[in-house]
């Protein structure tokens, strides 16, 4: 049993679009990520994805709209829905999703991280 | 698709030890709760439970130790482990757990909430 401090974990990595796992429960991973710039358009066939903004803000592009998610706000992207996270400035987010989730979903490119590291 | 603001949701209820559901994904609920005072000792047979402190701090008593969880910190209580949340002052927490989870686990008393409300 341990207490996990998010700021301490966030201080341990600096790269963008390469989330780290900080905890696992009930088959789900809790991850921390830093985003800056445009991610790739993608969807997840079987997993809903939750993004919670710890610091900063980002935009979630959907095919028919764009939503702005600010500090202290959450968005859930249902399975199957195409989306693209995008951030003008660095944003720190917490992610909740099944441990099976691949960051780029149905797309495989240089941003794909099949196996994430723990931090 | 909607953006969920945690402070706005927290402003919508005031009672202690009666969490509200704010989101559902992958069979899991995301809940907000306000704790003050001592909760009841209990465990969950099948569910790990995550507590994330949004504001304030609380103590998690275990049979062999007590941990202090401060703002920006997380604790995960594995299934089967007896625990008791306890807060001297009001603390606001986000919970992440399977939608089947009952707040008092294996104990049924006046604090039990079989069906939680959404907020």
Image (cartoon, coloured by chain):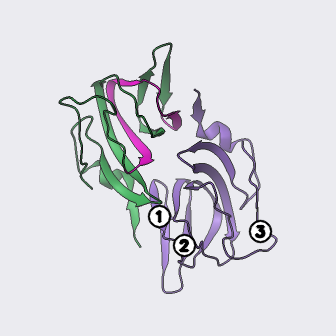
Chain colours: A green, B purple
Answer left or right for A29 relative to B4.
left
> Would you call the spot at circle 2 few (<14 residues within 10 Å), some (14-19), or many (20 or more)?
some
Q: Which chain does the residue under circle 3 lie in?
A: B
* Residue B8 colored in magenta in the image: no
Depicted B45 relative to depicted A113: above or below: below
The residue that mark 1 highlights is: B75
Query: Answer yes or no: do the residues labelled 1 and 2 have beta carbons within 8 Å?
Result: yes
Q: Residue at x 51, y 33 (%)?
A: A78
Mark nearer the N terminus (1 vs 3): 1
> Would you call the spot at circle 1 few (<14 residues within 10 Å), some (14-19), or many (20 or more)?
many
Answer left or right for A16 relative to A96.
left
Q: Residue at x 42, y 49 (%)?
A: A98
Mark nearer the N terminus (2 vs 3): 2
Secondary structure beneath disc 3? loop
The residue that mark 3 highlights is: B111
Secondary structure beneath disc 1? strand
Q: CA distance from mark 1 to mark 2?
A: 9 Å
Depicted A5 relative to depicted B118: above or below: below
Q: In the rendered image, is residue A119 in sight?
A: no
The residue that mark 2 highlights is: B60
Residue occupying the far bottom of the picture: B64
Query: Answer yes or no: do the residues labelled 1 and 3 have beta carbons within 8 Å?
Result: no
Percent from the top left, x then y, of residue B56? 56, 57
Q: CA distance from mark 2 to mark 3?
A: 17 Å
- Magenta segment: A71-99
> Would you call the spot at circle 3 few (<14 residues within 10 Å), some (14-19), or many (20 or more)?
some
Q: Residue at x 49, y 28 (%)?
A: A69
Answer left or right for B114 relative to B27.
right
A3 or A38: nearer the eye?
A38
Q: CA distance from mark 1 to mark 3?
A: 22 Å
Answer left or right for B14 relative to A72.
right
């Amino acid at each position: 049993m341990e207490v996990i401090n998010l700021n301490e974990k966030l201080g341990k990595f600096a790269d963008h679009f390469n989330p780290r796992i900080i905890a696992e429960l009930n088959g789900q991973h809790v991850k921390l990520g830093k985003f800056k710039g445009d991610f790739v358009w993608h969807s997840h066939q079987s997993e809903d994805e939750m993004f919670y903004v710890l610091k900063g803000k980002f935009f979630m592009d959907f095919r028919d709209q764009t939503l702005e998610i600010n500090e202290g706000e959450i968005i859930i992207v249902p399975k199957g829905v195409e989306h693209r996270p995008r951030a003008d400035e660095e944003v720190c987010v917490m992610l909740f999703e099944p441990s099976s989730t691949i960051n780029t979903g149905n797309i495989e490119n240089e941003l794909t991280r099949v196996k994430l590291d723990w931090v």
